Amino acid sequence: MNAKIYDKIATSIFYLIASLIMLLLFLIVGYILYKGIGVLNLKFITTPPKFMEPGGGVAPQLFNSFYLLVLSMLITIPLGVGAGIYMAEYARPGRITDFIRLCIETLSSLPSIVVGLFGFLVFVNSLHWGFSLLSGALAITVLNLPAMTRISEDAIKSVPESLKEASLALGATKWETIYKVILPSAMLQLITGTILTAGRVFGEAAALLYTSGMTTPDLKFNRLFSFSKVSPLNPLRPAETLSVFIWKINSESLVPDARQVADGASALLIIIVFLFNIISRYIGKMIYRKHTGSK
Amino acid sequence: MFKSHKNIVNIFIHILILFIILFATSCGRSDDNALMIMGSTALQPLAEKAAAMFMTDFPESNIQVQGGGSGNGLTAVRAKNAQIGNSDIFAEDKNGFDSSDLIDHKVAVVGFAVIANQGVGIDNVSSKQLTDLFTGKITNWKEIGGNNVPVVIVSRPASSGTRLTFEKYALNGATEIAGKALTQDSSGTVVKTVMDTEGAVSYVGLTYVKGDGSLKVLKVDGVEPSPENIASGKYQIWAYEHMYTNGYAKGITKEYIDYIMSDKVKPYIEKLDYIPISDMKVER
């Protein structure tokens, strides 16, 4: 009798904890969306912010967020997947591997503002790049690399040993095995993991405050692909992202509708992060279906 | 399976090459047309307005204005991280700072208002009461004739030019009480905090005081912080807005400074609640 009661209590406690977590999420997200959804419209997403008048938007900041994400992913993915392949396939268990693992884990627990200040000292000042997309992308890479490494390592390790053994038995070299057998099998996990990491990076603010700056030039989209210094694709220009913009508008802004703009930008940010998560699941399902031919 | 994975890698490599090309062509910072301005949040509105106007008149230029406070502005311009450092204080007045390389350009005068939350219940403080409020001697507004609300001081960091000016001219050199004030990094957050916190009192550049009555402006010794009172010297809490350059201003830096002191920007100096230096009848 006692055991059954304890079982019921434990079950209800677990259900309670799960509901608390869901409630917390709904409260926070719901509040932000409730306050900001009224501000979101096409004009908000396509016009730049105004100086001291109401009615500004977040178009350049949104573009900067996406572009910065793409730039940093371009650097992180090769490095991260490479490191993951090394840790999973080539590293022998021993002191050196343990040390490398320790380094990676320490890197992942660095506070993002410290990484941002490091970026400020090295990229912005010593290398004289100034506040730029490149400095921001490299600072974000430092933050993201451990996560990417872990994802790739797990993805590669989850490929069945028998697949690898069969490939080697057929005469393929180690690199051929990795490139042609293991990576395609791990592609599903790699892609979903990458997109989830991207969603996290999208909301990063502390590391970008002093690396990509708090201002953005007047972006002229009609000269997108020209080889000119005012092209929006120039990686050496300052680039305020959406999350930094939310911080700035709450602290230094003179527009009369600062509160509404901040609410709208926050709601937009949350919606985009949600979209990242949903898209990663969808792409994951699509790839799985393609590879295994099941429904 | 092989085909699909090859396509993804192919696309990836092509995008990589595209970015390398774009990167290579836009490499090399174009210093001639880029200008970075950092510093005082009190001067920031005027600097941003002038920058926007400048970039409209000269479309190839690229001027970025950031805040951070007068102290950061001075440090940045000396380390050449910014071409112009905005400051509410003279560089010589900054403690332990070697200002020998910096050249001063005064662009306007800014008045600082004492602001308080709507519920404090009084409209005027004497200089002595002001000093006592900020040094912690008065802890409740009812002690000076207001409502029964505890005093909450909202302050700025030690590097803020606004704060240094306030301590020098409003508190007669007394330092604000440490450890009891809410500290905010910029003029904008100070305004927000005072509006939202009962019993709050602080000080901010006149530009940030919106005329819609949501913020209470206190008179000091019966004198209102209006442009006329500041120009005549009746209201004492004001400072020059300095734009410092490292060495003599050249190129786009010089053009910008000349622009901001020209007649084109002059109407905006008054519109943004600064005072043109030419209107001042007193000097410091």
Image (spheres, rainbow, N blue to C red):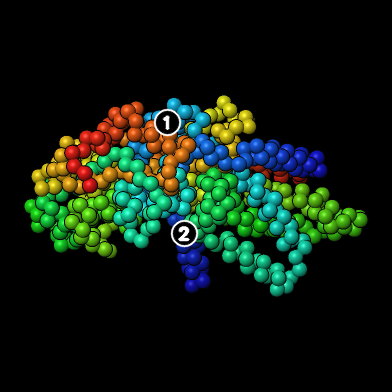
Can I make out residue B157 in this image? no
Query: Do discs 2 and 1 belong to a common subunit?
Result: no
Residue located 46% across and 46% down the image: B82
Mark number, residue B54:
1
Q: Position of residue B8 (x, y in %)?
A: 74, 41
In this image, A284 relative to A143: left or right? right
Q: Nearer the viewer, residue B124 or A129?
A: A129
Q: Nearer the viewer, residue B56 or A202?
A: B56
Subunit of mark 1?
Answer: B
**Res A20 quadrant in image:** bottom left
Mark number, residue A17:
2
Residue located 70% across and 73% down the image: A95
Q: Position of residue A136 (x, y in %)?
A: 55, 48
Mark number, residue A230:
none
Q: Position of residue B143 (x, y in %)?
A: 9, 57
Q: Are marks 2 and 1 in contact (CB under 8 Å)?
A: no
Whether B13 is drawn above or below B159: the answer is above
Q: Amino acid at mark 1?
A: Phe
